[in-house]
Image: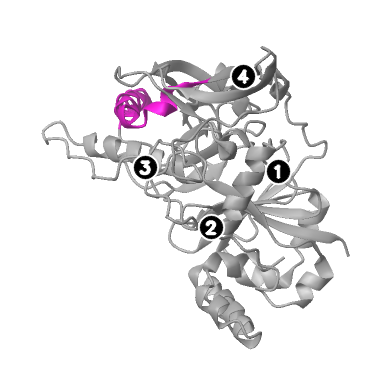
Amino acid sequence: MTSSSPVCVVSRHIVKPPPRPRECIPLTSWDVAMLLGNYIQKGLLFARAPFPTAELVDHLQATLADALATYYPVAGRFVTEQHRDDHGDVVGSTVSIDCGGQGVEIHHAVADGVGVADSLFPLNGAINYDDHELPLFVVQVTELVDGVFLGFACNHSLCDGTGFWNFLNGWAEIARARFAPAEAPPAEPASRPPPLFERWSPDGSAASPTVLPYADLSVLGKRPTPTPTPMRERMLHFPEESLAVLNERARQELLAAGDPAGAAALTRFQALTSLPDQQTVCFAAADNRGHLRPLVPAEYFGNCIKLVSTDAVRASELLSRWHGWAAAAHTDASIHAHVAASAANPLLRPGRLFPANAVLMGSSPRFDMYGCDFGWGKALAARSGRANKMEGKASLYPGRDGGFDVEVVMLPEHMAALEQDEELWAAVSPATARATKE
């Protein structure tokens, strides 16, 4: 913290799960692919709780310890093991989660003069490989002038967005059940399926850690290069009625193109992302759980995502075609082929996950962000931190009261061009269309 920062961290607490037998969980190719990227940074803005923030922090700390009893890998640390050949030479390294109960952190901060328009997150600039030293999960509770902001930082090699929001909702259920007047008995938390920590493998056998072709993984500690030009961000809201219109338009175009199966399977996400003379590609972080055979349960706690993309085409050609023309296949066979290729040549994604002149769709409106009620009401807004933001990044959120929210990050000149797109603004809610964050 610099002397000019309006945020002052007044306390830090280490939260540990109850003691349990120690174990190690291997990182698979999907997990290690994230080692060079930033943490997941997501946050929830709430109205003020009906008691002092210090008591709120105590409440969250106690219930977080109980949540870690179930989600115990979150309280672990990464460990690296070197692998040698028959001659004793180091040929590679593997990374695993040491579930030793080392603990997570919860910070209490005060932001004098900072209101609800600001978002505050811990571990800015950290990359996922840092968790040999840093906690896998940190939460910062920041008192604002007119609310309280819970900023979460979670290692992305530990889990993907599905696992992250499952963990937060499990914690929130425990906290909400215990948030009751002193004279009333605490409610029992809702029953939810337990998380699945055993890592997926292609043949159904016990997963082995992915061997990286490095003798010394300290080479992975290189920081992502900061973007020299400041980005602009906008949060756009697409109401249900706009999504219905877009979905029907895309469906009719698919029917006209002779693809009734595609029309029947069309989702609101596909309809929305089809709104886009250089070559361009649209990437999306796709969840593999529902595409693998047999299906991987929603409770799988790890990374189970694959970056899928359209073919590279000129933007003018993409705009002249119908909505489903550039869609990418995402099937059990394509996922297995990708895993086999990754096993032969492990992929470590750099800080920038996709090339220039491209768009990456991240997060998901299916994540239950507004279900994370910790006991004093539904969040007012969901936001993200600085992590993993670059030109062309778009993050999808559920709307608080329906529809989608889309966070768009672009260079100033590209954002200015987007702001002139009349088709886009016709689909965006007028109440939020002009809210701009520099």
Pointer 3 residue: 169
Q: In this view, does 387 lie above or below 306?
A: above
Q: Closer to the camera: disc 3 or disc 4?
A: 4
Q: Which residue lies furthest to the right in this view?
A: 277
- Tell which circle, 1 or 3, labels the residue nearer the N-terminal end: 3
The quarter of the picture where the C terminus appears is top right
Q: Dot 4: within a 10 Å radius of its alpha carbon, few (fewer than 14), some, or many (20 or more) residues?
A: some
Q: Residue at x 80, y 55 (%)?
A: 414
* Contact between labelled residues 4 and 2, with CB atoms less than 8 Å apart: no
- Indicate yes or no whether the magenta region holds residue 73: yes
- Tell which circle, 2 or 3, labels the residue nearer the N-terminal end: 3
Pointer 4 residue: 83
Which amino acid type corresponds to the residue marked 3 in the rendered image?
Asn
Q: Closer to the camera: disc 1 or disc 3?
A: 1
Find numbered disc 4 in the image and state the secondary structure of the residue it sits on. strand
Q: x, y percentage for residue 23?
A: 39, 22
Q: What stretch is highlighted in magenta?
A: 51-78
Which amino acid type corresponds to the residue marked 2 in the rendered image?
Asp
